[in-house]
């Protein structure tokens, strides 16, 4: 009897344990199932990757064909626009620069990239769905999900970064190109007033440290630079100017402290004279310069010294031939270094600034020549590729520009004009002794020199034009020496020495008053 019960108990134990082992045991997939899983994984991964490269293709093959066709058309359209932009960039560079500085275009790009990012993410999710992740093995299913969400995250991150970058760029452009200038060319020329401003700790208010007018032919880009000394005295104002009522005999003071560069400060301190002007100081300076040269100023731009340094760095520096050592520092601060002479010397923003700014051992007139040489170097070396690829850096540097009234719609045309100017030699005139004595200026002669120089410049492109208004050669003889009652002002940090009386400039200052080729003047320095 006992022997009969033992097999029965073993049988019951075996039958009781078998269901438990069956539940915990996993059936190994067959070769066919493993092959099908690999095919499903490859199909899914290929689908999401193909969506990134060719959006809509997966939907056309296995999903909503109308959605796929729409996505594919948009994607191909974007590539077509890129190709058109490339062609336009080769043929009409000014159009691309205009778009890069157009507020409406930047708004479209800013929000367009976000819409494209969202649309691409939705297509990736749909491609993941069409990949049938439920047919995959669990480990493959998890990897497929992670891959899809990594791609979605990358697409959305890129869209947000691009959108925010464009938004920042648009804010800079709106700040920089506020507009207000006169885009009409009465005589076929654009006349642009360039003011280099300095607001040092020892100075009262912002005032121009350098004053230059670039007169550019609208059809050829041929340029003439007119440099005005900042210490020019007795500057007259045109009829109708609010400053004319305040200074009917010109910007004159008994102590010889009322000079050309002080007009900006004085008008800025009396904004009631120009209630409709965004910058009363700049408007008053424009009126004075227009009256001095007999030119209608279309636009102006004031760049402070820090902005100048940043602008040079933004374009990658400039290269110049330097023939003499130029100190870094001096005056009220010790000399901390030197810019050494050499050919094709690369200058970053800091060193280019000191090359143009340094006054230790040099006069204001020498500094004026250096400043023109720096401007000429920038013009010759600034190419369209640099403008387009570094537009954001240039705009950030432009944020440090105190004032400009160039409208956004005209930036492309002006850049294209600058590119044309590279094909011509730059003529220059410096209204310094012995041509003009700042303490006793001959304003009629200044206007005559301007008219003659522009006529000569235009005759190079239009030979039928008369070289000068009166047929006579351009006058270069010095104006009459000033009398002791009205001595010339000598360049100094304040524009005059104590008491307003200063010695005449050195003979070296007379070199380079007028030149047909500014590059030759710069190489001879």
Image (spheres, helix red, strand yellow):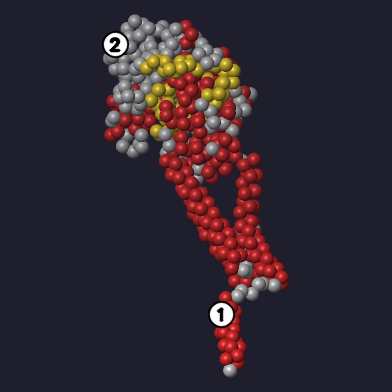
**Residue, x 58% and y 28% (percent of image)?**
381
Label 2 belongs to which residue?
Answer: 499
Residue 7 shown left or right of residue 295 in the figure: right
Residues 144 and 166: in front is 144
Element under label 1?
A: helix
Question: Which mark is drawn over residue 20?
Answer: 1
Instruction: From this view, report whether residue 126 is shown above or below residue 514.
Output: below
Looking at the image, how many numbered discs can be counted on the residues? 2
Q: Residue sitting at 54 percent across and 45 percent down? A: 99
Is residue 383 toward the left or the right of residue 292 in the image?
right
| Mark before the other along the chain sequence, 1 or 2 | 1
Give the CA distance from mark 1 to mark 2: 112 Å
Q: Residue 62 at x, y = what percent?
A: 65, 69
Identify the residue at horizontal 28%, vertical 25% (top origin): 246
Name the residue nearer the viewer: 202 or 141. 141
Residue 352 in picture, x, y percent from top left:
49, 23
Dot 2: element? helix
Near-viewer residue (394 or 140): 140
Q: Is residue 349 above or below residue 367?
A: below
Front residue (pair 463, 111): 111
Question: Which quarter of the picture shows residue 64?
Answer: bottom right
Give how far across and how far down residue 255 sits, in percent: 28, 14
Discs 1, 2 touching: Cβ within 8 Å? no
Indicate the quadrant containing the C terminus: top left, top right, bottom left or bottom right.
top right
Residue 427: which quarter of the image? top right
User: Where does residue 469 sit, x and y in percent of width and height?
Assistant: 54, 20
Tell me the tag on residue 53: none
State whether residue 399 appears in this view. yes
């Amino acid at each position: 009897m006992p022997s009969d019960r033992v097999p029965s108990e073993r049988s019951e134990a075996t039958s009781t344990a078998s269901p438990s082992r069956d539940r915990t045991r996993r059936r190994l997939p067959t070769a066919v199932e493993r092959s099908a899983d690999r095919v499903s994984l490859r199909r899914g991964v290929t689908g999401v990757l193909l969506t990134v490269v060719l959006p809509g293709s997966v939907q056309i093959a296995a999903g909503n064909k109308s959605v796929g066709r729409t996505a594919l058309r948009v994607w191909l359209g974007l590539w077509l626009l890129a190709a058109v932009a490339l062609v336009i960039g080769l043929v009409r560079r000014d159009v691309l620069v205009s778009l890069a500085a157009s507020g409406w275009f930047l708004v479209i790009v800013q929000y367009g990239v976000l819409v494209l990012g969202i649309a691409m993410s939705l297509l990736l999710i749909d491609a993941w769905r069409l990949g049938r992740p439920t047919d995959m093995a669990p480990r493959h299913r998890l990897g497929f999900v992670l891959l899809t969400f990594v791609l979605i995250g990358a697409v959305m991150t890129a869209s947000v970064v691009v959108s925010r970058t464009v938004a920042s760029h648009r804010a800079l452009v709106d700040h920089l190109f506020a507009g207000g200038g006169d885009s009409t060319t009465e005589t076929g020329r654009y006349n642009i007033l360039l003011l280099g401003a300095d607001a040092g700790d020892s100075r009262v208010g912002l005032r121009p440290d350098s004053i230059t007018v670039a007169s550019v032919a609208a059809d050829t880009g041929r340029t003439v630079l007119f440099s005005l000394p900042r210490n020019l005295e007795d500057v007259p104002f045109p009829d109708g100017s609010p400053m004319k009522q305040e200074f009917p005999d010109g910007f004159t003071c008994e102590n010889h402290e009322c000079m050309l560069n002080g007009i900006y400060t004085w008008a800025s301190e009396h904004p009631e004279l120009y209630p409709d002007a965004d910058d009363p100081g700049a408007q008053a300076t424009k009126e004075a310069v227009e009256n001095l040269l007999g030119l209608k100023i279309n636009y102006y731009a004031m760049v402070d010294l820090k902005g100048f340094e940043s602008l040079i760095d933004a374009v990658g520096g400039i290269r110049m031939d330097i023939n003499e050592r130029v100190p870094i520092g001096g005056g009220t601060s010790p000399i901390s270094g030197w810019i050494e002479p050499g050919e094709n010397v690369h200058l970053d923003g800091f060193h280019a600034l000191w090359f143009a700014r340094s006054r230790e051992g040099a006069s204001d007139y020498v500094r004026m020549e250096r400043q023109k040489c720096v401007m000429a170097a920038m013009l010759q070396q600034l190419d369209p590729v640099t403008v387009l690829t570094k537009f954001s850096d240039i705009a950030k540097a432009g944020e440090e520009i105190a004032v400009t009234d160039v409208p956004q719609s005209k930036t492309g045309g002006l850049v294209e004009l600058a590119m044309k100017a590279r094909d011509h030699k730059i003529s220059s005139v410096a209204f310094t002794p012995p041509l003009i004595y700042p303490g006793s200026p001959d304003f009629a002669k200044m206007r005559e020199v301007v008219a003659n120089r522009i006529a000569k410049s235009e005759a190079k492109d239009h030979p039928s034009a008369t070289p000068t208004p009166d047929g006579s050669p351009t006058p270069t003889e010095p104006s009459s020496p000033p009398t002791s009652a009205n001595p010339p002002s000598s360049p100094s940090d304040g524009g005059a020495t104590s008491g307003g009386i200063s010695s005449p400039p050195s003979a070296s200052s007379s070199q380079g008053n007028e030149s047909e080729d500014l590059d030759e003047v710069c190489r001879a320095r």
